[in-house]
Image (cartoon, rainbow, N blue to C red):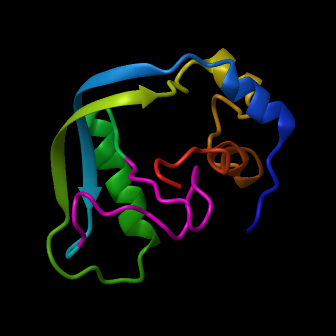
Amino acid sequence: MNFQPDPKVAEALARLAEVRYDGLAWKHTLPGQAVTAANRKGARWNPANVPAIYLALERDTALAEGRYLAGLQPPPIRGTRHLHEVTLTLERVLDLRDKATLQALGVSPTVTFVPATTLRVGSLVELPNG
């Protein structure tokens, strides 16, 4: 799916303050997948060819995501799934956890997997060196 930048979403994103994040996050991986592997095929927030590494700030969230991800794979998954604790220092983060922020971006705060809205946000990401 190709998305044209939505000027209203771009304007709402531009108004958000970037913050620094120092802390832990969690990532669930399938057998053979590196913890640093980016999703390039597209998912809830990133369109195809926009790399994204999906992490959770809570261990339980990562476990739930892992169960969801495993359920999407053709059975059976061979090997052991892994849960990784990752220490992060990120200089430029847009915090999208606030309900009002999500609503300003056109994303439902209760249902975040609506490609027509979440991918429009992700398509506006600025990639370093590119």
**Taking 128 as reference, is 44 left or right?**
right
Between 53 and 17, the one lying in front of the other is: 17
Q: Tell me where residue 81 sits by quadrant.
A: bottom left
Q: Position of residue 12 (x, y in %)?
A: 74, 25
Q: Which of 54 and 7 lies nearest the eye of the viewer?
A: 7
Q: Quadrant of residue 28?
A: bottom left
Asked if the magenta segment contains residue 114, the reply would be no
Q: Which residue is located at x 32 percent, y 31 percent?
A: 90
Count of marks, rendered view: 0
Q: In the figure, 8 relative to 125: above or below?
A: above
Q: Position of residue 87 (x, y in %)?
A: 17, 36
Q: Which residues are magenta?
A: 33-54
* Rendered location of residue 38, percent (x, y): 38, 61
Which SS does the magenta portion mostly show? loop
Q: In front here: 46 or 57? A: 46
Above-or-below relation of 63 to 7:
below
Q: Quadrant of the N terminus?
A: bottom right
Instruction: Tell me where residue 30 sits by quadrant.
Output: bottom left
**Residue at horizontal 17%, vertical 60%?**
82
- In the image, residue 89 sits, relative to residue 43, either above or below, namely above
Q: Residue at x 71, y 32 (%)?
A: 108
Residue furthest to the front in view is 129
Q: Which residue is at 84% across, 32% downward? A: 8
